[in-house]
């Protein structure tokens, strides 16, 4: 029995290996195919309008925030938690950075750094609240969402900040080799998040805690630390999303981030991330964000009533969850 | 077959239930006669729980028939079917809705409606009637959460009888009751018998069984070895022989010699815990396998959890390699004192089923593998490869998700995880539950080899043959204390008798 080497698959193992091409990879492949087809179909039916430089740039420019916000939600889903405060937190970080530049005259780099740090700090608070009070993360972040919502309006009322930093806004609209800088930033962030979960010890511990808290605990992993870390990472990424928004829009007010909660869930859920925790997919999340973005583009191109966009995205999320449930049931057998 | 066949309430014949790798029931017969208390006995894993689940419609049998008084063969498609057919059950764990009132709980399955609303008067009178039949006084409007354990147990019996059941199954009904409460319960049981019902009693407490039961069925290895015999014809000793029975086919394991004069790898002196352990003392040497035997609920796994820092130790001393230690967390137990815990529930506590094998094994050593904070898949593969060979795992590749392996291979993954962490003390909890016989033998050799390599092993098992095959000494645990020690001479007949007698010793002793 002991001469069975690892690399030599047993006869039944070949079938297994095909099954090892797990549901995760399958989801990513399906999403890649769907996004390609959707993109081609959209380009064809709009007579190539989509491929014009300006349109194409806009498609990717405004993909940056949904991508990062999706990754922010994914980080907490990894430990089986949810973060309802991502959207308003993004707005808060943007508002605070803008306020520091406009009202306190901080240099742009320092102000956006402060914004991102604020995001991580609020995430840390979320995580500590969950761990210390043992209240469900859904409830905790529902509460912090409401608090942050109020704080956002406390900074500058309903007024708008603008003209805070010309360089930053120019950078937000610039391109390198045809790719928008903000999109490249989002891409780098995605790669770093992927590296974190795949390669670092805390990243793996986080997934272990999410996949099986009991087993993780018995393996000497602190689940509490994993939860705090996941929320902190989520907040940090919300801060990054806030920074992208400042650079992209040129003006921010207290309502920024209100419409980000659904997209934050849509990307990871469609992307095949397990709601129960333990399984993440950065690629799936980014592809799903791209598909949702294409729905937006289609709306603009075809002049569809914007209300239909939410309906479609909602329906796709529901469908994705149903699909993943049937998939899990299939595996359990 | 006797002449009573006509009047029997329930006859089960040739019941078979197969789970992957194990025949839990392998041709069980059961005949229940009205107006009797029928004891269902057997050691852990003999098939009692499975039989109860088949009779109450939770499992469907793979073969065999169940016939009721009218002679019709029934096929239960769910628990509700069995209840409608007059089979009520009170499980070992409580199954009441705490926030509901006594009446609401009792009437839960038989709510009468009036104009689409629940008829609360009918509900209350049904509850009162059910309780009166048991001669139990309780306010039917108080919430169940305010009742004592014994009271809520009586409510469950009332609930089981609310559907006018003719058979009542009681699974270990007195395991959490005081002696007085148990007496009251058995008064109720006798009353039900006098009303012409059959009460099936599953209990490990032989003295109670002899005091209350009329007939007995004994299960062993999924077979009935005594079928509906009058209990009066047996002595306690004969019943124990029937339960343990079998001439055990010994596996020859390599002889081990334990240096009992050396400093023990792990030593407990008069340890008490927050869970209720009292004065637990034991010592394991390097290279020794110390068995910890006892009934389910005797406090063995709980002791292991306390040792690992998952529960608190409130008194006594724990020494690792002769030095007194205080273990606060599993991380500390593992990395500082090299104590590993191979859990009983490998699916729930041992493995990350969605994750690849290499991560499952390397989880305990990520810190050590990491270079500049990063862990490479390749270095995890190397850890896994080492144990694939040593433990004889059958896998298709290092990235295969753990959930796809068979039970035995999953257990090996769980074991590999602790070996990778270079554990010097291993607590192995029920290593072969749900594993087929052939793999079981291989596993026994493996555990013996680990001991030979110098690891101190604390083996928790409810499988007596396994215990006698592997252990050097066997400690018997009862009610969160050590009841005694048996030096294992690996002769099944004598050692098993000695162990079982300790397990079932009179409480007065």
Image (cartoon, rainbow, N blue to C red):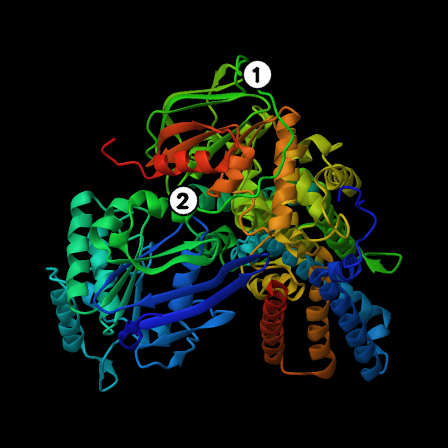
Q: Secondary structure at mark 2?
A: helix
Quarter of the image with the N terminus of chain B in it = bottom left
Res. A106 mark:
none
Q: Position of residue A236 (x, y in %)?
A: 62, 46
Q: Which residue is mark 1?
A: B259
Mark 2 → mark 1, Cα distance in angstroms: 50 Å
Is the residue marked by circle 2 packed among few (<14), some (14-19), or many (20+) residues within 10 Å?
Answer: few
**Above or below, comparing residue A249 to residue B43 in the picture:** below
The verdict on a common chain for dots 2 and 1 is no
Q: Chain of mark 1?
A: B
Q: Which residue is mark 2?
A: A133
What residue lies at 74% left-to-right and 65% top-to-bottom?
Answer: A26
Is the residue marked by circle 1 packed among few (<14), some (14-19), or many (20+) residues within 10 Å?
Answer: few
**Above or below, comparing residue A165 to residue A44 in the picture:** above
What residue lies at 46% left-to-right and 46% top-to-bottom?
Answer: A130
Q: Position of residue A195 (x, y in %)?
A: 74, 46
């Amino acid at each position: 029995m002991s001469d069975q080497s690892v690399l030599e698959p047993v006869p039944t193992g070949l079938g297994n290996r095909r099954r090892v091409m797990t549901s995760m990879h399958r989801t990513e492949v399906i999403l890649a195919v769907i996004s390609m087809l959707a993109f081609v179909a959209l380009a064809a039916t709009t007579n190539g309008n989509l491929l014009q430089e300006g349109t194409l740039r806009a498609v990717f420019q405004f993909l940056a925030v949904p991508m990062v916000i999706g990754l922010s939600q994914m980080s907490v889903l990894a430990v089986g938690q949810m973060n309802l405060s991502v959207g308003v937190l993004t707005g808060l970080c943007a508002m605070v950075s803008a306020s520091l530049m406009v009202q306190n005259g901080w240099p742009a780099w320092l102000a956006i750094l402060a914004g991102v740090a604020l995001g991580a700090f609020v995430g840390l608070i979320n995580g500590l609240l969950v761990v210390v009070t043992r209240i469900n993360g859904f409830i905790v972040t529902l509460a912090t969402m409401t608090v942050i919502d109020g704080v956002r309006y406390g900074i500058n009322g309903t007024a708008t900040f603008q003209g805070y930093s010309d360089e930053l806004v120019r950078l937000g609209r610039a391109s390198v080799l045809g790719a928008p800088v903000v999109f490249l930033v989002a891409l780098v962030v995605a790669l770093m998040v992927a590296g974190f979960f795949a390669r670092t010890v805390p990243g793996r511990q986080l997934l272990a805690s999410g996949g099986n808290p009991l087993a993780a605990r018995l393996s000497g992993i602190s689940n509490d630390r994993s939860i705090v870390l996941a929320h902190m990472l989520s907040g940090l990424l919300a801060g990054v999303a806030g920074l992208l928004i400042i650079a992209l829009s040129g003006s921010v007010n207290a309502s920024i981030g209100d419409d980000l909660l659904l997209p934050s869930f849509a990307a990871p859920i469609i992307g095949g991330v397990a709601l129960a925790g333990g399984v993440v997919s950065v690629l799936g999340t980014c592809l799903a964000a791209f598909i949702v973005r294409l729905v937006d583009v289609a709306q603009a191109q075809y002049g569809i009533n914007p209300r239909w966009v939410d309906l479609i995205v909602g329906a796709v999320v529901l469908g994705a969850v149903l699909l993943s449930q049937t998939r899990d049931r299939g595996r359990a057998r | 077959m006797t002449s009573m066949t006509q009047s029997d309430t329930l006859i089960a014949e040739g019941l078979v239930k197969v789970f992957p790798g194990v025949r839990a029931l392998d041709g069980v017969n059961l005949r229940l006669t009205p107006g009797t208390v029928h004891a269902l006995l057997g050691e852990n894993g003999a098939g009692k729980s499975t039989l109860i689940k088949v009779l109450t419609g939770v499992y469907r049998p793979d073969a065999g028939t169940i016939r009721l008084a009218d002679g019709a063969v029934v096929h239960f498609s769910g628990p509700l079917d069995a209840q409608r057919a007059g089979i009520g059950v009170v499980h070992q764990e409580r199954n009441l809705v705490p926030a509901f009132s006594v009446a609401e709980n009792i009437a839960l399955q038989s709510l009468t409606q009036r104009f689409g609303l629940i008829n609360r008067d009918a509900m209350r009178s049904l509850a009162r009637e059910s309780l009166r039949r048991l001669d139990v006084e309780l306010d039917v409007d108080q919430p169940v959460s305010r009742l004592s354990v014994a009271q809520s147990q009586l409510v469950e019996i009332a609930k089981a009888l609310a559907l006018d059941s003719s058979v009542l199954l009681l699974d270990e009904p007195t395991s959490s009751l005081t002696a007085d409460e148990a007496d009251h319960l058995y008064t109720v049981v006798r009353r039900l018998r006098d009303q012409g019902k059959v009460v099936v009693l599953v209990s490990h407490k032989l003295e109670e069984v002899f005091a209350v039961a009329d007939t007995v069925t004994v299960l062993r290895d999924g077979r009935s070895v005594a079928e509906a015999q009058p209990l009066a014809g047996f002595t306690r000793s004969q019943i124990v022989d029937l339960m343990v029975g079998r001439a055990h086919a010994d596996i020859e394991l390599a002889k081990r010699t334990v240096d009992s004069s050396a400093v023990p790898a792990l030593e407990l002196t008069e340890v008490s815990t927050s869970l209720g352990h009292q004065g637990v003392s034991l010592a394991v040497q390097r290279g020794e396998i110390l068995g910890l035997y006892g009934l389910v609920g005797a406090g063995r796994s709980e002791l292991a959890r306390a040792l690992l820092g998952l529960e608190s130790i409130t008194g006594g001393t724990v020494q690792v390699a002769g030095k007194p230690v205080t273990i606060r967390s599993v991380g500390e137990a593992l990395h500082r004192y090299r104590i590993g815990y191979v859990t009983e529930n490998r699916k729930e506590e041992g493995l990350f089923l969605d994750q690849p094998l290499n991560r499952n094994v390397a989880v305990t050593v990520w810190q050590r593998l990491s270079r500049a904070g990063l862990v490479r898949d390749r270095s995890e593969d190397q850890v896994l490869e080492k144990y694939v060979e040593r433990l004889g795992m059958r896998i298709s590749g290092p990235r295969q998700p753990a959930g796809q392996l068979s039970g035995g291979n999953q257990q090996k993954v769980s074991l590999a995880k602790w070996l990778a962490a270079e554990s010097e003390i291993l607590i192995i909890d029920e290593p072969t539950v749900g594993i087929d016989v052939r793999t079981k033998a291989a596993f026994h050799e493996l555990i013996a080899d680990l001991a030979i390599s110098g690891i101190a092993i604390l083996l928790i098992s409810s499988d007596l043959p396994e215990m006698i095959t592997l252990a050097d000494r066997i400690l018997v645990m009862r009610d969160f204390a050590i009841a005694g020690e048996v030096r294992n001479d690996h002769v099944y007949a004598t050692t098993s008798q000695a162990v079982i007698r300790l397990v079932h010793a009179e409480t007065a002793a």
